[in-house]
Amino acid sequence: MLLAALLAACAAAEPVYEGERRDRGEVAVVTGLSPLGPLGAGLTARIEAVDGQPLEGGRTRVELLPGRHEFLLRCSAGGTSGIVTTSAELRAGEAYVVALGLGPEGELDALILRP
């Protein structure tokens, strides 16, 4: 029961916008990767900043208003780790995930995608 409560708390998206919390249909939710997630250890993507606004301690889920946003991600995949920047155009009421990959030189790459 305690584990279920902890997982539910971790799943809550943090609003990253000014003003009162908006209805789910008015915001986009972006989810990073957790080492405890379904893909397992070794793949992580924490959202460290959005639009230049640092998120203290990083986040695995954020709520954003629609529009184009810039992301600073702390990622690790396949034994490689580092900071990756990417951007995405987000739509209200949509959910997005961080997709990680390795480029031709073995560097980390990330995209924000709708599952």
Image: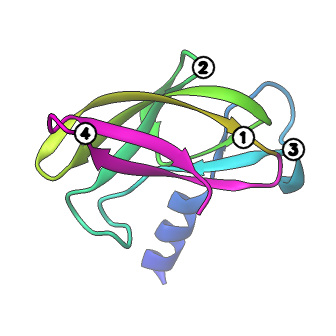
What numbered label is drawn on residue 90? 1
- Marks 4,3: beta carbons within 8 A: no
Task: Measuring from the top left, give residue 91's x and y in whole percent.
Answer: 79, 44
Q: CA distance from mark 2 to mark 4?
A: 24 Å
Residue farthest top in this picture: 52
Q: Is residue 97 magenta?
A: yes
Frontmost residue, 83 versus 58: 83
Q: Residues within 10 Å of mark 4 (few under 14, many from 20)?
A: few
Please state which of residues 38 and 102 is positioned toward the viewer in this rendering.
Answer: 102
Q: Are marks 1 and 2 in contact (CB under 8 Å)?
A: no
Residue at (55, 15) in percent of width and height: 52
Q: Callout 1, which amino acid?
A: Leu
Residue type for callout 3:
Arg
Vertical placement of residue 19 versus 115, above or below? above
Q: Secondary structure at mark 3?
A: loop
- Position of residue 111 in the picture relative to residue 80 (left or right): right
Using the numbered discs, state the Cα–Cα distance from disc 4 to disc 1 in whole angstroms: 24 Å
Q: Earlier in the sequence, mark 1 or mark 3?
A: 3
Residue 46 horizontal side relative to residue 35, left or right: right
Q: Residue at x 83, y 55 (%)?
A: 24
Q: Residue flagged by tag 2: what amino acid is it? A: Asp
Residue type at tag 4 = Gly
Q: Which residue is mark 2?
A: 51
Please tell me whether mark 1 or mark 2 is closer to you in this view. 1
Q: Secondary structure at mark 4?
A: loop
Q: Residue beneath label 3, please?
A: 22
Q: Residue furthest left?
A: 79
Q: Of helix, strand and loop, which one carries label 2?
A: loop
Determine the CA span between mark 4 and mark 3.
Answer: 37 Å
Residue 33 placed where, x, y %?
A: 40, 55
Mark 4, residue position:
103
